[in-house]
Amino acid sequence: MRMIFIGPPGAGKGTQAARLVNQFTIPHISTGDMFRAAVKAGTPMGQEADRYMKAGQLVPDEVTIGLVRERFAEPDTQAGFMLDGFPRTVPQAEALAEALKTDGVNLDVVLLLEVPDELIVERIIGRRSDPETGAIYHLTFNPPPAEIADRLVHRKDDTEDAVRSRLEAYHKMTAPIIPFYESLGLLKRVNGVGTPDEVTAAINEALK
C-alpha cells in the first residue's frame, strides 16, 4: 500500500496513521522525521537540507523531493509507505508526481480525512495534557479524573486564535492539492467525525 495521508490539523490523523502503518506493515514517513534521519545519516540531500535549516531558511521543494526519493529507495518501503505532511502545496504535489513517475513508483491512494473546522476548534481548545504521565484528555470528550485536573497543562498553541490560524493556512496552502489528486483518480475522502474506531472502519471501507 503506497499512500499519502492528508487532512487539516486536529482531524485525528495521528491516531489513524498509527493504526494504518500497523495494519499494512508499512513505514510512516513524515517530513520532519525524514529530515532528521537524513541529516543524522549524512546523506547528500540530508547535508543540503541541514545547510538551509542551520541558516534558518525553509528547505526548498527540490531538496525535500530529493529526500523523499532517497527515503523511498530504502528497503523498508518496498512493500509500501505512508507519506504524511508532504506535499503541502500544488507545486510540491506536481513535483512529487513527476519524481515518482521517473522512479517508477505508483501511488495507490491519497487518503483525505475530513472534519469540519468548528469541530476541530472544539477538539483542540479542549485538550489538556498531564505533564507527569503524558496522557491527553479533553474537557468534553475525555474528561480527566478530578484528582489530577489541577496539574493538567493547556498548550500555548491550543488556543482558538492559534487553531484558526493553522486552519486558515491549511485551507489556503494545502487544500488546493485535493482537486489535483482527485483529477488523477487517487483521492479517497473519509469522514473523520466519530470515535477513533468508527473513523478506522470508514477508512478501511474507503480502501477496499
Image (cartoon, helix red, strand yellow):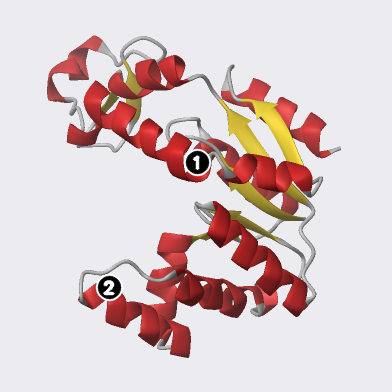
Q: Nearer the viewer, mark 2 or mark 1?
A: 2
Sequence-wise, the earlier of marks 2 and 1 is 1
Q: Which mark is residue 40?
A: none
**Which amino acid type is shown beneath numbered disc 1?**
Gly
Is residue 19 visible in the rendered image? The answer is no
Name the residue beneath numbered marker 2.
53
Badge 1: how crowded within 10 Å, few (<14), some, or many (20+)?
Answer: few
- Callout 1: helix, strand or loop? helix
Residue 172 appears in which quarter of the rendering?
Answer: top left
**Of 191 and 133, the residue lying toward us:** 191
In the picture, measured across the screen, residue 36 lies left or right of residue 193, that is left
Quadrant including the N terminus: bottom right
Please name the residue shown 60% across and 33% down the image: 113
At a point 69% along the width and 64% down the height, the residue shown is 97
Q: Is residue 193 left or right of residue 14?
A: right
Q: Between 179 and 45, which is closer to the camera in this rendering?
A: 179
Q: Is residue 114 above or below residue 76?
A: above
Counting from the top left corner in percent of width and height, residue 133 is at 27, 37
Quadrant containing the C terminus in the rendered view: top right
| Residue 109 sits above or below residue 133 on the image | below
Residue at mark 1: 14
Q: Looking at the image, can residue 15 be seen?
A: yes
Can you give x and y, in whole percent of width and height, for residue 158 in the image?
26, 29
For label 2, the crowd category at 10 Å Cα-Cα, with few meaning under 14, some 14 to 19 and many 20 or more, is few
Tell me how far mark 2 sits from mark 1, CA to CA: 25 Å
Disc 2 residue type?
Answer: Met
* Side of 103 where 115 appears, left or right: left
Return the residue nearer the eye: 42 or 182.
182
Indicate the secondary structure of the residue bearing disc 2: helix
Q: Is 107 situated above or below 127?
A: below
